[in-house]
Image (cartoon, coloured by chain):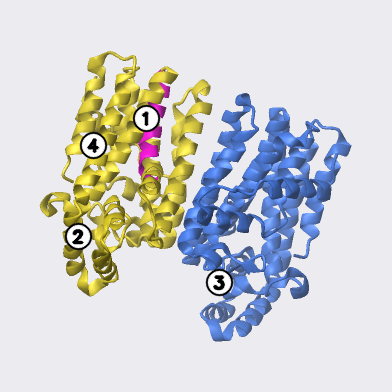
Chain colours: A yellow, B blue
């Protein structure tokens, strides 16, 4: 078994050997740019970990891992346009560097290429199932992104809706990555399903953690300005939990804070953090995160795989939960 | 054998029964809107015609026909954003009606759903090949769109490059439609290939015809303003042919015409048409179109299918070539 860093190295080597040299360059240069920007490479690593539980020869899973990472980056390219986010991993986002039109079309080709990569090394007998897993996740990711957009204009989002949104927008691609990795590796249905559920719950916990870090993280470690979600009035778990608990008096304060615009960003972040603290919403969010984290681990216990093989997965999950960025 | 109008009716019935009722509505309403706007439905009809040459039960091909039409409409949604085209089939284009962000994301889901539809009724044994045909076309369509965008900034585009661009941007999806229809119907490799080549050449002839109609069509029949390509300095076959033939004196005139902007649109269109007439570029384009049209028909002659069955295909091709809109 390879550890997480070894798998990441393997993946990065494969990525650097897989640059698209196709024509026209104006279509493919933005793809290579975005794919090279870095990131945790969490999705391909999860796919390879799932594969390796059942088969040692991970070379057969490298293109599928690349497919999942490419699909993820396609969603980043288009989401960054929609969110008008000009920075991605400390560098200009795709549309900031190449223009909106280029980011639309190069995003499109990334999606199409991810299907091609997914099929490349997949056995004919597996292709129907692998495609179905991937495509279902792709549909849900678009639905999750639309829910997220719809939430911006709504005040009445509840926790269940929020969980569905982050499950679709974030967790299902982690789930698909592990489900595909397991399928390619020859896992039983039961083991594949357990890994899918593990990744779904882990993905939800991961996203809740993201929400917490965006507001309460250590600025020197998070690597971006704290409070971005508050400034944008994003319907995070913190926001949703807080607004459901407000007294009548604080409701008026909350209203005035979310009405604040650009000039008063610092005041807005401080004011909301004070409210969040008063209603202990960080604790509530943290508890929900831990529940999903525990639930994730519980799925591993249902698997018929030798215990030591699962250690890396548990370690990976723990690292994700304890991260500070 | 059903005639073209019967096949269109079949397809439109299936389309109206296949409206996406999924959630969230803000994601799927724009999809249903664009799919309902009309059009010739050329691609699904070609798929069904190819299928019917080999199998009578076209119900098995309806979802694949819908997949091809949905993919085509995905490209329209995103192309209209890039071209800032606010009108599509006489109605507001998707982004004009729902906004750019909605058109990006609803376009994305159309692409993903087209894969899903394509697989729905496809036999397991055919799925690998059908997917490959579709995905190769999808890649080329994006490459063709990028070539078209690149041409805007270039003066030195030649006829070969232009033919490659319209082949990728337009013809390969017609080719894929017939190739997939034939494959689903159980055609031999030889027959499938002949139909693919027929559609490619027909698609190129169709696009050249489009170029001619945009400049020399009858305004009362074309259904849009004449000269749009000239106003935008589009590198059409007329433009490319003309600029390769210009005398030194006319080169200066050509330069001054392409430099004209909004206020002088009528002057620009008239001036360019005069140059086009002087250099007989309409005849040159028309001759090239006829060559591709003849070549298209010649592929049908290589097929081992009873002659009368091919009559509808020949009729369809002739209709496309003689159309005035």
Task: Indicate the quadrant containing the N terminus of chain A: top left, top right, bottom left or bottom right.
Answer: top left
What's the magenta bit mostly, secondary-structure-wise? helix
Residue at x-position 71% and y-position 52%: B41
Residue at x-position 64% and y-position 41%: B176
**Label 4, label 1: how far apart the Cα atoms are:** 16 Å
**Label 2, label 4: how far apart the Cα atoms are:** 23 Å
Residues tagged by mark 4 and mark 3 found on one chain of the structure: no
* Mark 2, residue position: A275
Residue numbers of the magenta segment: A169-187
**Label 3, label 1: how far apart the Cα atoms are:** 55 Å
Position of B293 relative to A152 (above/below): above
Q: Chain of mark 4?
A: A
Nearer to us: label 2 or label 3:
2
Determine whether the residue tagged by mark 1 lies in a helix, strand or loop: helix
Residue B233 is marked as: 3
* Mark 4, residue position: A290
């Amino acid at each position: 078994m390879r550890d997480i860093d070894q798998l990441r190295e393997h993946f990065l080597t494969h990525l650097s050997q897989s640059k698209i040299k196709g024509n026209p360059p104006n279509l493919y240069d933005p793809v290579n740019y975005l794919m090279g920007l870095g990131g945790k490479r969490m999705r391909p690593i999860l796919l390879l970990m799932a594969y390796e539980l059942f088969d040692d020869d991970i070379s057969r899973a490298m293109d599928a891992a690349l497919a999942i990472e490419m699909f993820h980056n396609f969603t980043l390219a288009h989401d960054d346009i929609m969110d008008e986010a000009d920075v991605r991993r400390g560098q200009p986002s795709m549309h900031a560097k190449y223009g909106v039109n280029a980011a639309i079309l190069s995003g499109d080709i990334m999606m199409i290429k991810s299907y091609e990569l997914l099929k490349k090394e997949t056995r004919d007998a597996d292709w129907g199932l692998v495609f179905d897993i991937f495509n279902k996740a792709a549909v849900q990711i678009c639905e999750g992104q639309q829910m997220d957009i719809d939430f911006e204009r709504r005040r009445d989002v509840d926790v269940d809706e929020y969980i569905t949104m982050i499950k679709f927008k974030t967790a299902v691609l982690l789930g698909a990555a592990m489900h595909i990795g397991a399928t390619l590796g020859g896992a039983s249905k039961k083991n594949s399903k357990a890994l899918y559920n593990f990744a779904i719950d882990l993905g939800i916990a991961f996203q809740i953690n993201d929400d917490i870090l965006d507001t309460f993280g250590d600025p020197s470690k998070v690597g971006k300005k704290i409070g971005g979600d508050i400034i944008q009035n994003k319907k995070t778990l913190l926001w949703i939990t807080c607004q459901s608990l407000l007294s009548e008096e604080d409701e008026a304060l909350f209203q005035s804070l979310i009405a604040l615009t650009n000039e008063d960003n610092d005041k807005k972040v401080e004011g909301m953090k004070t409210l969040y603290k008063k209603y202990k919403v960080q604790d509530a969010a943290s508890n929900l995160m831990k529940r999903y984290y525990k639930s994730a681990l519980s799925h591993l216990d249902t698997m018929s795989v030798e215990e030591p093989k699962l250690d890396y997965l548990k370690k990976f999950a723990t690292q994700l939960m304890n991260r500070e960025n």
